[in-house]
Image: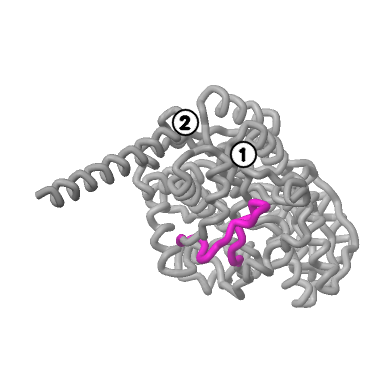
């Protein structure tokens, strides 16, 4: 009987210790809630490729995780930064200081990314960039609590730029959005073109955003370059491609290269206009059973649209963040950051993805070509996958890093 009594006492003590540890972990959630802010373009040129769709993706990740982490509720809020760095910075400061936001996600527009990532670093918060593109976000302007998830300009340039040169497009002229993102995309693509054996004949920078590309297209046409590289995104890319078609540029023999094209852009253009475009993407909804299953769930919430890589990336980043909070036993940013870099990324978006020390999530990218109208079997059936680009090839090697906190180690 004494033995049984001791066993029961030991069991009770073990249970008490387990409950105490669980309570301690739960107590590490600041303000008794984990709050995620989706900060993006809800009304402008990037609204279709991220916007409300990214908010729904974040909500789906929270729901799929169970709505709680460490026994505490998870909330998702959102705001429109209007593609202005000062507005984005003001929202981020208010969210962190007043609304106690723990993590900020999505973040299209490099200028906004740079401002918000610095705020998150200074105030010990996590940011996960899905739609921002510039390589500097995990390079010169890296952050110990900042992450770059879905793609970047280096990956886009390596895929599309290299492929176009290999197909004979060895002379280039760029139409470039005149802000940090466009400059970075032109630079990355130029380097990829030259490395592949091509030559850059020149470039022209256009205001962001702009509706009239006529003068810029005429300069590109006059360059006689075989490829006109569009170092822009969203509504700017759509307008440039539409107006190039009106000018008969492709029919006259020059090729267009959309350096950052989303499936929402193809939908807006239509296959008749977009057919033949070669694009690099981090996600395609119709790639396999897992991507189709998730995308159809998302589509049911978004009036039949299909998700862009940015929107799918938001889901993946938010889900990984919640897994890291659970593993860390706290929502404190540095502890969560450490776990995010330790845990592999395995979901419908990425298989065996790895978060590097600089915050870059490394995963496979896809080189795709837009189908001809007669090749499409139905709505949103837009891409032929030409090849898989391994993550180790797609992203800038960490051995070439200029990340300040890594160089200090």
Q: Nearer the viewer, residue 272 or 225?
A: 225
Q: Is residue 356 magenta?
A: yes
Q: Is residue 7 visible?
A: yes
Residue occupying the point 50% across, 47% down: 321
Please rate how many residues cluster around mark 2, counting C-alpha atoms within 10 Å: few if below 14, some from 14 to 19, many from 20: some
Q: Is residue 318 magenta?
A: no
Seen as rendered, the residue at the extreme top is: 98
* Segment tinted magenta in the rendering: 347-365
Q: Nearer the viewer, residue 294 or 228?
A: 294
Seen as rendered, the residue at the extreme bottom is: 167
Point out the frontmost of discs 1 and 2.
2
Please rate how many residues cluster around mark 1, counting C-alpha atoms within 10 Å: few if below 14, some from 14 to 19, many from 20: some
Left-right relation of 346 to 66: right
Left-right relation of 186 to 108: right
Residue occupying the point 89% across, 60% down: 222
* Helix, strand or loop: magenta stretch: loop
Q: Which residue is mark 2?
A: 30
Q: Which residue is mark 1?
A: 44
Residue occupying the point 64% across, 49% down: 234
Circle 1: element type: loop
Q: Is residue 252 above or below residue 319?
A: below
Where does residue 23 sit, x and y in percent of width and height? Answer: 35, 36
Q: Is residue 209 above or below residue 185?
A: above
Where does residue 35 sit, x and y in percent of width and height? Answer: 47, 34
Left-right relation of 39 to 287: right
Q: Earlier in the sequence, mark 1 or mark 2?
A: 2
Residue occupying the point 46% across, 46% down: 322
Left-right relation of 344 to 232: left
Q: Is residue 47 visible?
A: no
Distance CA(mark 1)–CA(mark 2): 34 Å
């Amino acid at each position: 009987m004494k033995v049984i009594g001791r066993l029961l006492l030991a069991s009770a003590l073990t249970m008490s210790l387990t409950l105490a540890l669980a309570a301690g972990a739960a107590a590490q959630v600041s303000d008794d809630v984990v709050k995620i802010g989706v900060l993006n373009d809800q009304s402008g040129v990037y609204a279709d490729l991220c916007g409300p769709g990214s908010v729904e993706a974040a909500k789906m990740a929270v729901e799929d995780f169970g709505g709680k982490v460490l026994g505490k509720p998870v909330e998702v809020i959102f705001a429109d930064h209007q593609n202005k760095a000062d507005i984005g910075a003001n929202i981020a400061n208010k969210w962190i200081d007043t609304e106690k936001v723990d993590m900020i996600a999505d973040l299209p527009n490099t200028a906004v990314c740079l401002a918000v990532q610095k705020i998150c670093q200074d105030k010990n918060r996590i940011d996960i960039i899905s739609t921002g593109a510039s390589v500097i976000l995990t390079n010169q302007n890296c952050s110990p609590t900042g992450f770059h998830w879905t793609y970047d300009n280096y990956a886009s340039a390596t895929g599309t730029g290299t492929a176009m040169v290999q197909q004979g497009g060895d002379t280039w002229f760029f139409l470039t959005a005149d802000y940090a993102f466009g400059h970075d995309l032109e630079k990355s693509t130029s380097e990829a073109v030259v490395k592949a054996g091509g030559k850059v004949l020149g470039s022209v920078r256009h205001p962001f955003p702009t509706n009239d590309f006529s003068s810029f297209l005429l300069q590109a046409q006059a360059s006689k370059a075989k490829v006109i590289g569009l170092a822009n995104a969203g509504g700017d890319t759509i307008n440039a491609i539409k107006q190039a078609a009106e000018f008969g540029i492709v029919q006259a023999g020059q090729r267009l290269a959309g350096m950052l094209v989303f499936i929402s852009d193809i939908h807006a253009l239509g296959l008749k206009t977009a057919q033949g475009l070669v694009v690099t993407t981090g996600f395609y909804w119709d790639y396999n059973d897992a991507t189709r299953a998730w995308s159809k769930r998302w589509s049911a919430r978004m009036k039949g649209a299909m998700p862009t890589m940015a929107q799918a990336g938001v889901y993946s980043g938010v889900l990984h963040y919640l897994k890291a909070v659970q593993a860390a036993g706290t929502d404190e940013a540095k502890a969560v950051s450490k776990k995010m870099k330790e845990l592999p990324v395995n979901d419908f978006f990425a298989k065996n993805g790895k978060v590097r020390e600089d915050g870059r999530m490394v995963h496979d990218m896809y080189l795709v070509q837009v189908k001809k109208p007669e090749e499409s079997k139905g709505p949103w059936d837009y891409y032929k996958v030409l090849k898989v680009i391994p993550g180790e090839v797609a992203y800038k090697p960490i051995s070439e890093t200029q990340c300040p906190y890594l160089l200090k180690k």
